[in-house]
Image (cartoon, grey):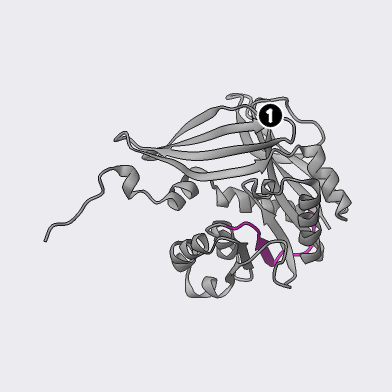
Amino acid sequence: MSVRHPANMAAAADRHDLYQRAVQDVEAEIDFVLETWGELRARAAITLREDFCGTANTSCEWVRRDPAHRAFAIDLDAAVLEWGQAHNVAALDADQRARIELVHGDVLDPPAREADIVVAMNFSYFLFRTRAQLGAYFRRARSALAEDGILFLDAYGGYDAPREIEERRDCDGFSYVWDQVSFNPIDSCMRCEIHFEFPDGSRLPGAFRYHWRLWTLPEIRELLLEAGFQSADVYWEGTDPETNEGDGIYTRSEVGDADPGWICYVVACS
């Protein structure tokens, strides 16, 4: 009996695996969350809620860090949750699996469970394209937090952010392509896509597609405060003086660099 082999590398590729390897750094992400929580709060954080969780990679990292940690991860896409359950949650040990729950649901109508921390990373909340929608999400996130809870977001911008351009980065065994397909300056909405390219010349186009609003930091901070958060601080990445690149160290800042592209964290305390 003959065995059918994929015609090319793209046909054999798993887009969720590629995304996790190219885009996510959950170890650094949870490092930042824990360090910042420790600076702002005197007690330990126990429960984390991951909104727009996708494959729940961040939640898995959270429960791996401490035997007391618990997580629940929310996403509207049942298929991606199934992938996360089969590939990420299944890789945890029995105790860790008992402390994580994947929820197929809407972040605007989440389970009635209190969390110390809510995270919404990879700019996922940009999917809300009006102030009313984003404000409603921030209010719901705040209502889910403990009295001293914290919401962690990331954001991106810079003068290249609204441009219709492609950025390519080599990864281990493939190339990651971020494609800013279109931008409308009237409503600040844009379409973006992620493509993957392989050494054999094959390609996985439009592996992920986004239609979202390019929110500015002043808008995000103002909406957080309007939603009832006591503070909404930006944590800006420092610069390595030898390479002139980001050093991976984020500190609370009121002044940022006018770079072509930047990524920062926004930390909102309830």
Res. 137 in view: yes
Magenta stretch: residue 202 in it?
no
Q: Position of residue 243 (x, y in %)?
A: 57, 25
Horizontally, is 42 left or right of 195 in the view?
right
Give the number of callouts.
Answer: 1
Relative vertical location of residue 94 with respect to residue 211 in this rendering, above or below: below
Q: Residue at 69% across / 50% down in the picture? A: 125
Looking at the picture, which amino acid does disc 1 mark?
A: Gly
Q: Please identify the quarter of the rendering in which residue 64 is found.
A: bottom right
* Residue underneath mark 1: 158
Q: Which residues are magenta?
A: 40-53
Point out the image quarter for the C terminus.
bottom right
Q: Please identify the quarter of the rendering in which residue 210 is found.
A: top right
In the image shown, does 79 or 241 lie closer to the viewer? 79
In the image shown, does 270 or 3 lie closer to the viewer? 3
Secondary structure type for disc 1? loop
Q: Position of residue 127 (x, y in %)?
A: 67, 48
Horizontally, is 9 left or right of 191 in the view?
left
Point out the image quarter for the N terminus.
bottom left
Give the class, few, some or many, for how many residues have Cα within 10 Å of label 1's Cα (few <14, many ≥20). some
